[in-house]
Image (cartoon, rainbow, N blue to C red):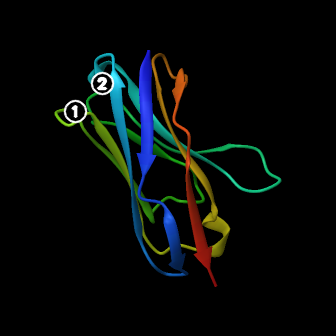
């Protein structure tokens, strides 16, 4: 089992920045690719970003490319999502995930991000 806890959400004005953190415990963190997803009210959960086991490869949804950066620190068992130039449409609950083989096997409880216009 892997336990994931997100932090760093909050209220920010459009154009502002936030940095989300995901702290993992349980199994070996570096065995898992890490991802960030989000779910806005009334919408399905959607992919935001993903980072490989070593951090050497990253992937982004087109909607956040160039504004968000995913990273990880395997020594600290943490993954991060730096979000810049935030827009009101980025408002959602953001979830951290851990998985192998391209899937998401474990999920955090989510952290709310609200971007005001």
Q: Residue at x 41, y 67 (%)?
A: 18
- The local crowd at label 1, few if under 14, some if 14 to 19, many if 20 or more residues have their Cα within 10 Å, is some
116 relative to 65, above or below? below
Q: State the image quarter where residue 79 is shown.
A: top left
Q: Residue at x 27, y 24 (%)?
A: 30
Q: State the image quarter where residue 19 is shown.
A: bottom left
Please name the residue that numbered disc 1 is placed on: 74
Toward the viewer: 115 or 112?
Answer: 112
Residues at marks 1 and 2, CA–CA distance in whole angstroms: 6 Å
- Residue 15 percent location from the top left of the image: 49, 81
Q: Residue at x 43, y 33 (%)?
A: 4
Please state if 65 lies on the left or on the right of 30 as rendered.
right
Q: Please state, as top left, top right, bottom left or bottom right, where the N terminus lies in the image.
A: top left
First along the sequence among labels 1 and 2: 2
- Residue 29, labelled with which disc? 2
- Residue 34 percent location from the top left of the image: 42, 33
Please state if 12 lies on the left or on the right of 41 as rendered.
left
Q: How many marks?
A: 2
Q: Residue at x 32, y 18 (%)?
A: 31
For the residues bearing labels 1 and 2, Cβ distance under 8 angstroms: yes
- Residue 54 percent location from the top left of the image: 26, 30
Q: Please state, as top left, top right, bottom left or bottom right, where the C terminus lies in the image.
A: bottom right
């Amino acid at each position: 089992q892997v336990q994931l806890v997100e932090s760093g959400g909050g209220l920010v004005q459009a154009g502002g920045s936030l940095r989300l953190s995901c702290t993992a415990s349980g199994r070996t963190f570096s065995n898992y690719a890490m991802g960030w997803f989000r779910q806005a009210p009334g919408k399905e959960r959607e992919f935001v970003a993903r980072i490989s086991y070593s951090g050497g490869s990253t992937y982004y949804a087109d909607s956040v490319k160039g504004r968000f950066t995913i990273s990880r620190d395997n020594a600290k068992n943490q993954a991060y999502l730096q979000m810049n130039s935030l827009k009101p449409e980025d408002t959602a609950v953001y979830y951290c995930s851990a998985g192998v083989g391209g899937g998401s096997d474990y999920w955090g409880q989510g952290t709310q991000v609200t971007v005001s216009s």
